[in-house]
Amino acid sequence: MKKILFLTIAVFMFAACSDNLTDLNVDTKNPQEVPAANLIANATVELFDIMSTASVNENNFRLWAQHWAQTTYPDESNYELVERNVNGRMWNTMYATILRDLKEARQIIEADANTVVEVKANQFAILDVMEVVAYTHMVDIFGDVPFTEALTDDSSPAYDDDAAIYDAMITKLDAATKNLNGDSGLGSADFIYGGDGNAWKTFANSYMLRLAVRLADSNPGKAQGMAEAAVAGGVFASNADNFTIQFEGSPPNTNPLWEQLVQSGRSDFVASNTMVDYMVGLSDPRIGTFFKNQIMVVDTIAMDTSFIWQGGTFGASNGYATNSQPGSILESETLPGTIMGYTEVAFLLADANERGWNVGGSAAAWYDIGVANSIMEWGGDEATANAYLAQPNVAYDSAPGNWKEKIAMQKWIALYNQGFEAWTTYRIYDAPVMNVADGAGTTPPFRYTYPTTEFSLNGDNVQAAGAAMGGDDLFSRVFWDVN
């Protein structure tokens, strides 16, 4: 993984005759302490990198969401994790880099006697929010994971119950929102909001809304209270609020997608027939942006040719040239990486309305906003969005399925470049209907299994965690996945 460290190394000058011999024990080429702001910056970049990348060694969520299919080597489309240590790399990045950097940043801020109390409160709150994002992602991916004993000197930490971790994170997030306001003092080291504590507060509330919808089926009373408080505190109101990072135009700070789709020179991915078939059936105007290269079809009887969007068979080895491919827009070095945006918030509010929660608006209105905002994010205009929403198979009142299936379909499409949340949408709603992977013979799993290194280094605890999950199995469910 690429790193952004921004380290300033002091140069120590001392005379040859100096009698301060302790100076000779100082490594002048390596800092003994990294500034907290740099650690926060690095944790941020690592988080967005691991969630944005399409590397099959690190992140298979676009495949598990069935947005893409593979060409020569379709193992990851058949839910293989161990061969490339995909689950291990996700685990190590979250714990050894992201959460470790955040912990060390907290210790440095705590020891800083020069920063005013109000600024430190904002910095601690931002660290809390980042930790919430990291730990809830780990729960959503694995289920039970180390928490109370994580990042300690204990080399074999116990695993905590996934629901208990969520409870702790919800409490932490709620407390953080009360301390987020004004300037955090992080400035340009905050790659997301430029040090603006109020912007972080809006994200914290929006993320609380996400967690509320996660809990809606397992703990509806708690979920409702969380959602209503979050909306009252202020959630995303436009794309300007998005929790996103702006990648740069040259390595090593480009969007990881550019590395896999362009810099690598490889042709590993094509459009999935799951995604293409749904979008063609809905006459979705985003398809020409999501994907490129329609495939020529020759009708030998009518002596006619036509061009169609063609998705590769999910789970099979597919020809690159004979299928449509990920769109050119994804090949930009500077394409922003997004972990949460206004489009998602709109669909969350549509869901909340259907559950009878007091969050304002109506399910149909928020559904329309989510669809329209996605279309305009991907280059469409208001007229195009209105025409799409007017179709009977898209309009909220007449689209097929129950309310969950309607929201799931359009949310899953809209989250095209957010594979993790698209896969999670499928788990929340058990919709839309996914294809059976050609090799695995199953629809998408519900979780990652634990890394093999955990069984060799922390065997008793990981085995206990697997048993608590109903087996360390791809189809064991995270606690909130009760459908």
Image (cartoon, grey):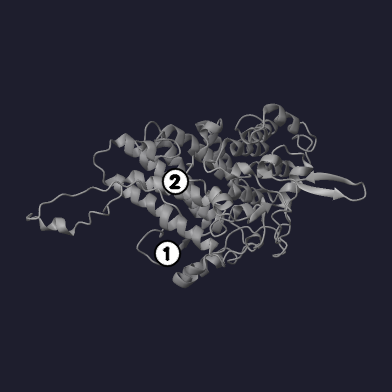
The picture quadrant where one finds residue 269 is bottom right
Position in image of residue 6 (x %, y %): 35, 46
Q: Residue furthest front?
A: 303
Work out whether residue 429 or residue 7 is closer to the camera in this orientation and state it. 7
Contact? badges 2 and 1 (CB < 8 Å) = no
Position in image of residue 349 (x %, y %): 62, 36
SS at circle 2: helix
SS at circle 1: loop
Q: Residue furthest top?
A: 383
The picture quadrant where one finds residue 70 is bottom right
Position in image of residue 357 (x %, y %): 62, 36
Mark linked to residue 81 = none
Q: Counting other residues with Cα less than 10 Å from the Cα at mark 1, is it few (<14), some (14-19), or many (20 or more)?
A: some
Work out whether residue 284 or residue 219 is closer to the camera in this orientation and state it. 284
Q: Counting other residues with Cα less than 10 Å from the Cα at mark 2, is it few (<14), some (14-19), or many (20 or more)?
A: many
Lower position in the chain sequence, tag 2 or tag 1: 2
The mark lying in front, picked from 2 and 1, is 2
Mark linked to residue 130 = 2
Work out whether residue 9 or residue 99 is closer to the camera in this orientation and state it. 9
Left or right placement of residue 233 versus residue 189 in this view: right
Work out whether residue 213 or residue 20 is closer to the camera in this orientation and state it. 20
Q: CA distance from mark 2 to mark 1?
A: 21 Å
Position in image of residue 90 (x %, y %): 50, 58
Left or right placement of residue 326 versus residue 461 in this view: right
Amino acid type shown at disc 2: Met
What residue lies at 58% left-to-right and 64% top-to-bottom?
Answer: 81
Please say whether residue 172 is visible from this viewpoint.
no
What residue lies at 34% left-to-right and 48% top-to-bottom?
Answer: 105
Q: Which residue is mark 1?
A: 157
Amino acid type shown at disc 1: Pro
The picture quadrant where one finds residue 329 is top right
Please say whether residue 309 is visible from this viewpoint.
yes
